[in-house]
Amino acid sequence: MSPSTEQGNLVSPLLSIIEGERGRHDSPGEKTACAYKEAEAVKAFYRIARADEFLLENADKTGEIFAENREEAWPFRAQFLGFTLPLLGAGVAREKRAKL
């Protein structure tokens, strides 16, 4: 979960999607299914906090990206998280998200 923002809390299942749910490397399709499942679970559980709609809206791309980036790619993931975490905390306008 990101820090509180002026708009309240934003909850993202990103790390859970990266980890997966099968105990092995997920295929892109399995990772996409996991993205849908995790995003819906977050929306159902956190009724007041904003859920990370971007992952749900881009589940196919999320599945492709994280099925290909396995444990040996943790330096890439660290770089990705270093870029995205401040954005989650600050909030990004919906129309600017795809560009970022």
Image: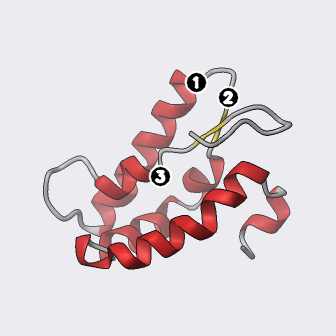
Measuring 40% from the left and 65% from the top, which residue is drawn there? 63
Q: What residue is disc 1 on?
A: 46
Residue drawn at (37%, 47%) of the image:
16
Residue 24 occupies quadrant = bottom left
* Residue beneath disc 3: 14
For disc 2, the marked residue is: 49
**90 shown above or below 1:** below
Q: Is residue 28 above or below residue 45?
A: below
Crowd rating for badge 3 (residues with CA inside 10 Å; few <14, some 14–19, many 20+): some
Total numbered badges shown on the rendered structure = 3
Alpha carbon distance from label 1 to label 2: 6 Å
- Rounded to the nearest angstrom, the CA distance separating label 1 from label 3 is 15 Å
Disc 1 vs disc 2: Cβ atoms closer than 8 Å? Answer: yes
Q: Is residue 25 above or below residue 57?
A: below
Q: Quadrant of the N terminus?
A: top right
Image quadrant of residue 93?
A: bottom right
Amino acid at circle 1 = Tyr
The CA distance from mark 2 to mark 3 is 15 Å
Seen in the picture, residue 82 relative to 36 is either above or below; the reply is below
Residue 4 falls left or right of residue 78? right
Which residue is pictured at 40% across the width and 72% down the height? 64
Picture quarter with the C terminus: bottom right
Q: Residue at (48%, 45%) from the top-left corner?
A: 13
Q: Residues within 10 Å of mark 2 (few under 14, many from 20)?
A: some
Return the disc, 2 or 3, that comes first in the chain's sequence: 3
